[in-house]
């Protein structure tokens, strides 16, 4: 075990853990954002630089600080390490630059993007981005591509996090897509269109942090905050069968795998569960999906939320003032004979 101090909070983690894993063990707002790291995908991380932190003390044996910011998702902890994230102004300033860099080619088409409302890049830009961009060059653009019966690729939105590549590598035995070309010309693609047809191909939609890979059966049907997520399960011979059903009325708009608080899928599901079983009769309903109150999806939920006492008291006083004003106005109108 190794002890690490992260933003003034000491935590003990197993040897070999990364700084990001140590921060997630603490939890809360001090956890660095991550656009490419995925806890269930081996080898992920180190691509987007969104999780950069400052190591002010390397270890108890060598207290010297690391000269540059490090990616917390791939940097292992050392006993006695001291790390700063939200308390370091250098980290926060660099993070603004990372957002600006990710948005250089990413189009601001959130109003028409199916990922809006559950987009990691949206949340990242809202918390750490600047109002204006300095980039004035021509952005790169791509035509949309069908990768299979169920998946459409919007390469213009892709931030090259490599998550979909790792997912296909580790869930299937025949990956047919990857990163083509190099540098600013790099793109996700396949040699032949419509070739992704394996049983777990739909999981690349769930792991994508932006709207680059979208579900063709759900495209433009509804905003996610108008849907009601419900936990459900079924007996499936291919996967765990644990999913989230997204309802609009009595219709199941889409089926997704369950995600944790960091928007990561822990147990992947097969295409049969995702695309071919969209009837309530196919599932055993467990109950409403718990949604974080900070998420825009929670605005349409039906879980009862208790108001604090001071808000209830304030509301009662406000309504009483409104009623008193209305009664006073009615009395005045009666005096001048305008109402009976």
Image (tube, rainbow, N blue to C red):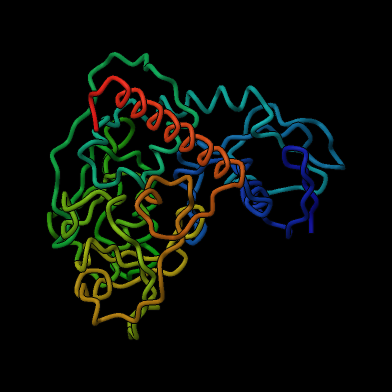
Across the whole image, how many numbered discs are drawn on residues? 0
Asked if 176 appears above or below 29 in the picture, the reply is below
Asked if 154 appears above or below 107 in the picture, the reply is below
Residue 330: x and y in percent read 33, 29
At 44% from the left and 21% from the top, the residue drawn is 130
Q: Quadrant of the C terminus?
A: top left
**Nearer to us in this view, 68 or 116:** 116
Q: Quadrant of residue 245?
A: bottom left
Residue 159: x and y in percent read 35, 38
Q: Quadrant of residue 133?
A: top left
At 49% from the left and 29% from the top, the residue drawn is 128
Q: Quadrant of the N terminus?
A: bottom right
User: Does residue 34 show up?
Assistant: yes
In the image: residue 165, left or right of residue 85: left
At 84% from the left and 38% from the top, the residue drawn is 62
Asked if 198 appears above or below 133 in the picture, the reply is below
**Nearer to us in this view, 61 or 114:** 114
Q: Quadrant of residue 32?
A: top right
In the image: residue 144, left or right of residue 5: left
User: Does residue 239 show up?
Assistant: no
Residue 156: x and y in percent read 23, 36
In the image: residue 45, left or right of residue 59: left
**Nearer to us in this view, 102 or 317:** 317
At 23% from the left and 24% from the top, the residue drawn is 338
Asked if 28 appears above or below 57 in the picture, the reply is below
Residue 118: x and y in percent read 36, 47
């Amino acid at each position: 075990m190794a002890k690490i101090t992260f933003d003034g909070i000491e935590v003990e983690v197993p040897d070999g853990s990364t700084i990001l894993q140590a921060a997630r063990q603490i939890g809360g707002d001090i956890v660095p954002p991550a656009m490419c790291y995925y806890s269930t995908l081996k080898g992920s991380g180190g691509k987007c630089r969104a999780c950069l932190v400052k190591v002010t003390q390397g270890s108890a044996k060598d207290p010297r600080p690391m000269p540059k910011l490090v990616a917390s998702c791939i940097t292992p902890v050392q006993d006695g390490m001291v790390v700063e994230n939200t308390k370091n102004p250098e980290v926060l300033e660099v993070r603004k630059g990372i957002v600006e860099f990710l948005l250089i080619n990413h189009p601001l088409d959130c109003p028409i993007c199916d990922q809006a409302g559950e987009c990691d890049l949206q949340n990242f830009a809202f918390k750490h981005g600047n109002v204006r961009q300095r980039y004035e060059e021509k952005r790169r653009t791509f035509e949309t591509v069908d990768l299979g019966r169920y998946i459409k690729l919007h390469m213009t939105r892709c931030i090259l996090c490599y998550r979909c590549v790792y997912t296909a590598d580790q869930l299937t035995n025949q990956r047919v897509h990857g990163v083509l070309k190099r540098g600013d010309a790099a793109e996700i693609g396949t040699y032949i269109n419509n070739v992704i047809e394996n049983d777990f191909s739909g999981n690349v939609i769930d792991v994508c942090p932006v709207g680059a890979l979208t579900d063709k059966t759900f495209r433009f049907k509804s905003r996610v905050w108008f849907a009601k997520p419900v936990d459900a399960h079924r007996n499936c011979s291919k996967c765990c069968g644990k999913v989230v059903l997204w309802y609009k009325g009595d219709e199941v708009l889409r089926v997704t795998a369950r995600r944790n608080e960091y928007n990561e899928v822990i147990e992947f599901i097969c295409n049969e569960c995702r695309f071919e079983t969209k009837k309530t009769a196919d599932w055993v309903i467990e109950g409403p999906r718990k949604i974080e109150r900070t998420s825009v999806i929670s605005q349409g939920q039906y879980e009862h939320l208790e108001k604090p006492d001071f808000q209830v008291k304030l509301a009662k006083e406000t309504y009483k003032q409104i009623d008193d004003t209305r009664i006073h106005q009615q009395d005045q109108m009666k005096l001048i004979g305008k109402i009976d």
